[in-house]
Amino acid sequence: MISAALVAPPAFAATVHQSAPSSASSSAHKLTHSRRRSSRRVRGQQAIQSDRVTEIQQALIREHYLSGEASGKWDSTTQAAMQKYQSDNGWQTKLFPDSRAIKRLGLGPDYSSAINAKSGNFAPPPSAASIPSSQAAGFAQSSGVHQ
C-alpha cells in the first residue's frame, strides 16, 4: 500500500507541458541574448576632463592636500589627495570626487547665469521690529516662548 502511494501521482499536482524549443528559435534566442550582452551601455562618468582636473588640483593645492603644480592629469597623487580630503571630512573615499567635496572646495555649480538669478527677489526679510507687537505676542504664545 505504501509503494502504491509513492508510485501514484498526487491528486493535487498539476502537469505542465512545455514544448521543446525548435533549434531555429533556440538559436535566435541565443543570438539576441548575446547581442544584448555585447551592446551594453556603459553608464556613469568614466573620466574627468583635464580642465576640471586642473581646477580640482588647484583647489587641493590651496587646501594643502596636494603640492606642486596642477598638471590636469587624474594621477595617483591627485587621487590620494582627494581621498585624504574626503576622509578628513568624514565622507566616502572612492576614486571619483564626492559632490560634497567638490562643493566644499568651491567648485560646485554656478547659478549666476540662471534664469532668475539677476532679476529674482533676494531681499532680506523685514526686521523683527517691524512686526506689530500683537502679532509678535501671538507668535510667542503659540511657540511656547515667554517674553
Image (cartoon, rainbow, N blue to C red):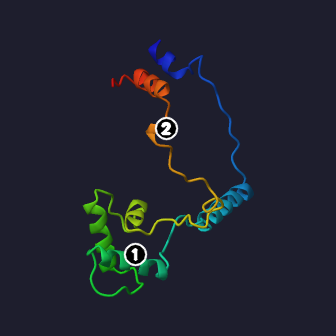
The reply, left or right, for residue 127 in relation to residue 77 is right
Residue lying farthest top? 1
Q: Tell me which amino acid carries mark 1.
A: Ile
Near-viewer residue (13 or 59): 59
Q: Tell me which amino acid carries mark 2.
A: Ser
Select label 1 or label 2 by which is in front.
2
| Residue located 47% across and 12% down the image | 1
Q: Which image quarter is the C terminus in?
A: top left
Q: Secondary structure at mark 2?
A: helix
The image shows a total of numbered marks equal to 2
| Residue located 43% across and 24% down the image | 137
| Residue located 49% across and 26% down the image | 135
Mark 1 neighbour class, 10 Å CA radius: few under 14, some 14 to 19, many 20 or more: many
Residue 30 x/y as whole percent: 65, 60
State whether residue 115 is above or below residue 57. Answer: above
Q: Earlier in the sequence, mark 1 or mark 2?
A: 1
Q: Which residue is mark 2?
A: 130
Residue 45 x/y as whole percent: 51, 68
Q: Secondary structure at mark 1?
A: helix
The numbered mark at residue 13 is none
Query: In the picture, residue 143 is in which quadrant?
Result: top left
Query: In the picture, residue 95 is in which quadrant?
Result: bottom left
Q: Which residue is mark 1?
A: 56
State whether residue 140 is above or below residue 31. Answer: above
| Residue located 50% across and 50% down the image | 124
State whether residue 29 is above or below residue 55. Answer: above
